[in-house]
Image (spheres, grey):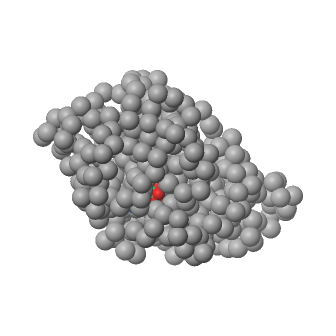
Amino acid sequence: MKVLVTGGAGFIGANFLLHSVPARRNAQFLNLDALTYAANPKSLAAIEDDARYRFERVDITDGEAVRQSVDAFDPDLIVHFAAESHVDRSILGPKQFVRTNIEGTFNLLEACRARPDRLFHHVSTDEVYGSLGDEGFFTEDTAYDPSSPYSASKAASDHLVRAYHRTYGMPVKITNCSNNYGPLQFPEKLVPLMILNAVEGKALPIYGTGLNVRDWLYVEDHCRAIWAVIDKGEVGETYNVGGHNENTNIDVVDTLCALVAEALGKEKDALLDLKTFVQDRPGHDHRYAIDASKIERECHWKPAESFETGMKKTVAWYLEHREWVHDVRSGDYKRWIEANYGAR
Ligand code: NAD
Ligand code: TYD
């Protein structure tokens, strides 16, 4: 089996490859990634010498380059992660989100259409459904109602994927997952940002009231969910993925302060004092919560990690991988990527 992964040098894509290359012994993997600010090719060191794994620096907004890679590799399965993924960046500059998330997905769909038996697995987000009140859950039938340019661009890409199934008969599957956390996440997202700021004694910026709720899932559980849907899900279907771990942002930050304090032998209260309430994000969704009963029932998937065990592992990982953090934050590192992988 030949598996083409896009965005495999980013957070979830790299975890997916590190999990899949050793586990799927009869598969070959090609990773297409543009190596944007969010990527770290060193995350993939454990598999880079594996003969069944290969990397190509390709920007999915370049339709011709995508077509050439797809034609040459001739994949049986595409797992599409590549995206601009950070909501705050989408508010500051939506254009690249439209290009990568919508046009990039379109380019991949067009390139994959040539072979009608190729399975296209599209990795998406629960943010396409918009915001919940204090009650209820997102199901696969919840109407799309995205709030941010990020979630609107992901919603558009989901619609394109579904349209290619209905119109051209392309075999597709879509997973809409809740907030992921774990190793290898770029430290602009809530969890790694708070861990590193707490370690470095910097302010912990909490948007608005801090009472917004997210449904947290450990990244390895998401990777297993994607394979569960590829292996057992129905073609043309959507599956919501979530861990039943609803927490307010304040709860998440308090948990992380306690874990960092324990790991470093510091006073927890000194870290909690770093919490700083700042201006709210425009269009900030109040609550996300996933009804994951369809994937549990049809694909026999359940998360293995609880919020407590997953957050503990995540804090330990960031404390043990300061060089990785330095790399992704540093301009020198971007120059190292250009020298080793060429310019985009
Ligand atoms: P990320 O930002 O960490 O990584 C994105 C990767 O895509 C990077 O390696 C980047 O270099 C690559 N990329 C970006 N633009 C590209 C382009 N034009 N061409 C080729 N490669 C490009 O993102 P992530 O958190 O790993 O998210 C992966 C996917 O999962 C995204 O589609 C995202 O919408 C989805 N998702 C994320 C979460 C989450 O909590 N992080 C939750 C649900 C769904
Ligand atoms: P984030 O990790 O950006 O994920 P998303 O916006 O995709 O859910 O943010 C998670 C939550 O944390 C969200 O409600 C916004 C909030 N947040 C803060 O309060 N402070 C921060 O510095 C960041 C990055 C996020």
Residue appearing at x 54%, y 74% in the figure: 335
Q: Position of residue 40 (x, y in %)?
A: 55, 59
Q: Position of residue 141 (x, y in %)?
A: 29, 38
In terms of depth relative to the viewer, which is nearer, 232 or 22?
22
Residue 120 in view (yes/no): no
Residue appearing at x 57%, y 69% in the figure: 336
In terms of depth relative to the viewer, which is nearer, 145 or 44?
44
Residue 292 in view (yes/no): yes
Horizontal relation, residue 64 to residue 147: left or right: left
Q: Position of residue 210 (x, y in %)?
A: 56, 63
Quarter where residue 2 is shown: top left
In terms of depth relative to the viewer, which is nearer, 282 or 261?
261
Q: Quadrant of the C terminus?
A: bottom left
Extreme residue toward the left, this view: 167
Q: How many marks?
A: 0
Extreme residue toward the right, this view: 265
Residue appearing at x 27%, y 30% in the figure: 235
Q: Position of residue 174 (x, y in %)?
A: 33, 40
Q: Quadrant of the N terminus?
A: top left
Quarter where residue 329 is shown: bottom right
Quarter where residue 297 is shown: top left
Q: Is residue 277 above or below residue 233?
A: below
Q: Is residue 314 above or below residue 325?
A: above
Q: Is residue 111 above or below residue 327?
A: above
Horizontal relation, residue 166 to residue 286: left or right: left
Residue appearing at x 44%, y 40% in the figure: 29
